Image (cartoon, rainbow, N blue to C red):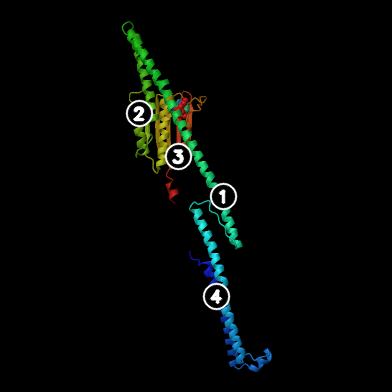
């Protein structure tokens, strides 16, 4: 800080006044004596003033007055200025300490400055501000606590809901299908001698059922797969995901057209990857499609992801309250300033279109 203490400033000002008054007086005397030596008639002055200004007695008295005045000014400076300055300094110190304490988080500290109107005002303002801050912090912490509990509750609800869904899916789809397969196999083995033609038809049915069960399993695995790009680029990550699906022997065909995207931040990359995963998982689980395509490309500064299937389409009347997939996809894209659209027609298929602005880092850098 450049400023000097209040005490220092007050004393300096008092001294300046004292010395400048002495200087003015000395200057006046000098000018007068100069004028007289230049021939101004001392008789004229005596007539005008009524006394002889420059007689030795008057002159001595004048010098004595000047000296006494100066000395008393200096004494007054010390007797008045020093205590005033000291008390002011103490009060200001108290305000400074209080500010320091508040900024360090001691929110219950209050000021008690007395004696100077302005400082009392500052002290009251400080106390009001500290009180307000204390209350705000208190309610903020309460909010954080409540939020944490809410979040924990929501996470627990979501994960137990997810577990319930997986269990239901395993039961409804896979376990039912396995049961159907096992009874069909049993029936087929009985008829294989008497009705070989019928048995052949049953075998085809069994093959289809096994294929479906496999598909359901793939979708579940896709759904449960940990979501992490593991240092792969978005293109590589999606490619790896699709390779893992191993659809060679399934009854669904896949087309891909994946391009590198420039200027992706890890957050954006991850969100788009998760959306891809959920969209493909939905196709495998719900669409009954025979083919689907995944396209990823960049045009100007927009990332575009199109995932399209030729399945049964989304039944809009079947708006399940407990489904998180589609709302979460939308949320992920929209929170990055992107656009999420679903176009779906019954028995024609579903297309998910994602558009996200990319390469914005220059905005943050500048
Ligand atoms: N590609 C799709 N084809 C047909 N139906 C779909 C497709 N994607 C989603 N759906 C339907 O939309 C519903 C909601 O999907 P989603 O929000 O991902 O929830 P979940 O997959 O957990 O059921 C699904 O249950 C399904 O009925
Ligand atoms: Mg889903």
Q: Residue 195: horizontal and vertical position, in percent?
A: 34, 6
Can you see residue 26? yes
Q: Nearer the viewer, mark 3 or mark 4?
A: 4
Residue at image mark 2: 245
Label 4 CA crowd tier, 10 Å (few <14, some 14–19, many 20+): some
Question: For mark 3, does the 10 Å Cα neighbourhood hold few (<14), some (14 to 19), or many (20 or more) residues?
Answer: many
Query: Residue 174 appears at what percent x and percent y?
Result: 39, 21
Whole-angstrom CA distance, mark 2 to mark 4, is 91 Å
Nearer the observer, disc 2 or disc 3?
A: 2
Do residues under tags 4 and 1 come within 8 Å of each other at their CB atoms?
A: no
- Residue 143 point in image, percent of width and height: 52, 41
Return the residue nearer the eye: 163 or 333.
163
Q: State the residue at coordinates (50%, 39%).
A: 147
Query: Which residue is labeled 1 in the image?
Result: 132
Q: Which residue is mark 3?
A: 356
Q: Earlier in the sequence, mark 3 or mark 4?
A: 4
Q: Residues within 10 Å of mark 2 (few under 14, many from 20)?
A: some
């Amino acid at each position: 800080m450049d400023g000097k203490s209040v005490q220092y400033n007050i004393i300096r000002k008092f001294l300046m006044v004292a010395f400048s008054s002495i200087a003015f007086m000395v200057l006046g005397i000098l000018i007068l004596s100069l004028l007289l030596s230049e021939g101004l008639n001392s008789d004229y002055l005596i007539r005008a003033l009524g006394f002889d200004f420059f007689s030795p007695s008057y002159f001595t008295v004048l010098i004595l007055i000047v000296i006494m005045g100066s000395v008393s000014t200096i004494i007054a400076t010390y007797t008045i200025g020093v205590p005033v300055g000291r008390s002011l300094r103490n009060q200001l110190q108290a305000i400074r300490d209080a500010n320091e304490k508040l900024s360090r988080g001691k929110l219950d500290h209050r000021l008690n400055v007395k004696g100077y109107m302005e400082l009392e005002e500052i002290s009251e303002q400080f106390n009001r501000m500290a009180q307000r801050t204390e209350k705000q912090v208190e309610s903020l912490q309460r909010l954080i606590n409540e939020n944490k509990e809410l979040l924990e509750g929501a996470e627990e609800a979501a994960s137990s809901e997810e577990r319930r869904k997986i269990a239901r899916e395993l039961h409804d789809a896979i376990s039912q299908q396995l049961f159907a397969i096992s009874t069909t196999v049993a029936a087929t083995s009985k008829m294989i001698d008497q009705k070989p033609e019928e048995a052949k038809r049953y075998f085809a049915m069994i093959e289809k059922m096994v294929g479906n069960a496999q598909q359901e399993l793939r979708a579940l695995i896709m759904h449960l797969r940990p979501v992490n790009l593991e240092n792969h680029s978005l293109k590589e990550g999606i490619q790896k995901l699709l390779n893992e699906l191993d659809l060679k022997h399934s009854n669904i065909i896949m087309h891909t057209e994946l391009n590198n995207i420039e200027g992706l931040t890890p957050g954006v990359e991850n969100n788009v990857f998760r959306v891809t995963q959920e969209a493909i998982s939905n196709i495998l689980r719900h669409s009954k499609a025979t083919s689907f395509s995944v396209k990823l490309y960049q045009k100007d500064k927009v990332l575009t992801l199109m995932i399209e299937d030729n399945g049964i389409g989304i039944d809009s009347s079947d708006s399940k309250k407990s489904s998180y997939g589609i709302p979460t996809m939308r949320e992920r894209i929209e929170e990055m300033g992107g656009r999420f659209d679903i176009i779906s027609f019954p028995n024609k298929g579903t297309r998910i279109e994602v558009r996200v602005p990319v390469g914005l880092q220059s905005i943050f850098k500048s």
